[in-house]
Amino acid sequence: MLRILLLGDTHIELDLPLRPRVQRRHRGPDFVRNLKLALEPARRGEVDLVIHSGDVFDRPNPPIEVARLAYDPLVAVAQTGTHVLIVPGNHERSRLPFPPLLAHPCIHVFDRPERWRGSVAGARIEVVGMPFNRCADGTAVRHTLAELEPPDPSADVRLLLGHLAVEGAVVGIDDFMFRAGRRDVLPGGAVPGRYAALLSGHIHRRQVLRETPGGRPFEAPVVYAGSIERTSSVEREEPKGYAILHVDPGPGGGRLDEVEMVDLPTRPMTILEPKALRQDDLQRWLDAELRKLTPDAVVQVRLRAGAKLSAKAAREVTPETMSLRTMVPRRRIGA
Ligand SMILES: [Mn+2]
C-alpha cells in the first residue's frame, strides 16, 4: 500500500504584503503556516509521495522572498528523499516562477502535460500531470492524453493529476455545482479509466467524486483535497486541510483504497452587514459587534451603498488579533 499526501490551493501571497503600510493582522502568515503543517507528515517520513495540485501562489509573479516561503517547505521534503510532484494552477498562469529554486532531483514540476515515472516504496508509479488549461472539457483532456507517450502497462500505480473542475464538484456557501457542457468542466463520462484516481486542485472544497450527478459511475474517483485555508468568504463554513490517500498497487493502475481528510487550523470567518451610513455611527456599531466575536476572527464588513467608513476609523476599533476588511457595494453601471 502506498501513502500519498495530497495538498493544493495553498495561495501563498494572499494578504501577505512584504512591507505593510499599516499595521493590522494579515492573513498571509496563516497560509504559510498551514503549508508547513500540511507537509509535516512528509517531513516525518510518514508518506511515500507528496503531490501539490496547483495554485501554489495567489498571484503569478510573486517576489522571490514570497516564492521562497512557498518553496522552502517543499524542498525540505524533497531533501528527505521523498518525491514532490507539482502541477501549476491558474493563479500562477500554469507555470511556477523561479524554477531554479525548485531544482532538486526529488522535485518534479509539470510545466506541460507529461508522464512522470518513478519508483516509490518499491512500486513503479506513473503520474500524468496536466497544468491548468482554460479548456478542460472531454475533448481537450482526451486530446492532451493522446499527445503523450502511451501508458506503461507494467506500472503498479497510475495517477492523473490536474487543476480542473469535474462535473458534480460543489463549491461555495450555496452549494454551487459544476455541470457538464462548459468548456472548463470535465464531464464525468470523460474521466479516463486505467488510473487509480484523478487528483486535482482548483475546487476549494474538499470532496471525492465517484459518479455524475445523474448517478453514472466514473471510470476513476476524483479527489479534491481543497484549499489549506479559506481564500474567500464563500468558504467560511468549510473545514480546511489536506488528504492522505492509500493506494493499492495492482493491474490497471492500482486502486484508491482510502482517502483520509486531515484538518488544518482555520480562523473563524464572519460577515457583518451594518445598516448605518455615517462614520461615527458605523464605528460605534462595529466596536460593539467586534467585541462579541472571538479574538482571532476574520471579519468582512459589507457596507451599504453610500456608507462612509474610512480604513483608519475601522482600524481604531478592530482588535490587533483580528483581520478585518471592509467592502463597498459595486457601483452599477447602466441597467
Ligand atoms: Mn485555487
Image: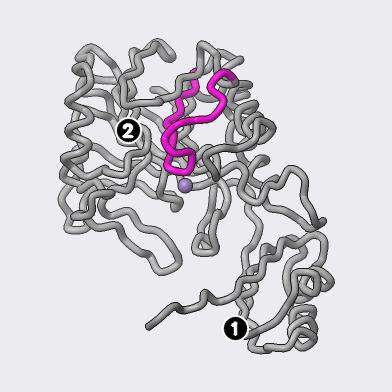
Please give the range of residues in magenta.
Answer: 83-100
The residue lying toward the viewer, choosing from 41 and 227, is 227
Residue visible at 24% across and 37% down in the picture: 220
Looking at the image, the residue that sits furthest to the front is 334
Q: Please tell me how crowded label 1 is: few (under 14), some (14-19), or many (20+) other residues with Cα within 10 Å.
A: some
Instruction: Find out if the beta carbon at label 1 lies less than 8 Å from the nearest ligand 1 atom.
Output: no
Tell me, yes or no, whether the two marked residues, 1 and 2, touch with CB atoms within 8 Å.
no
> Above or below — where is 7 with respect to 214?
above
- Give the residue type at disc 2: Leu
- Location of residue 205 in the rendering, given as x and y in whole percent from the top left corner: 44, 53
SS category of the residue bearing label 1: loop
Which residue does the numbered mark 2 point to in the structure image? Answer: 256
| Position of residue 103 in the picture relative to residue 249 (left or right) | right
Q: In this figure, which residue is indicated by the disc labeled 1?
A: 304
Choose top left, top right, bottom left or bottom right for residue 176. Answer: bottom left
Name the kind of residue labelled 1 in the image: Arg
* 99 relative to 56, above or below: above
* Residue 295 lies in the magenta stretch: no
How far across and how far down the image is residue 252, in percent? 20, 23
x, y percent for residue 152: 23, 14
With 230 as the anchor, is 168 left or right in this view?
left
Point out the tag, 1 or 2, that comes first from the N-terminus.
2
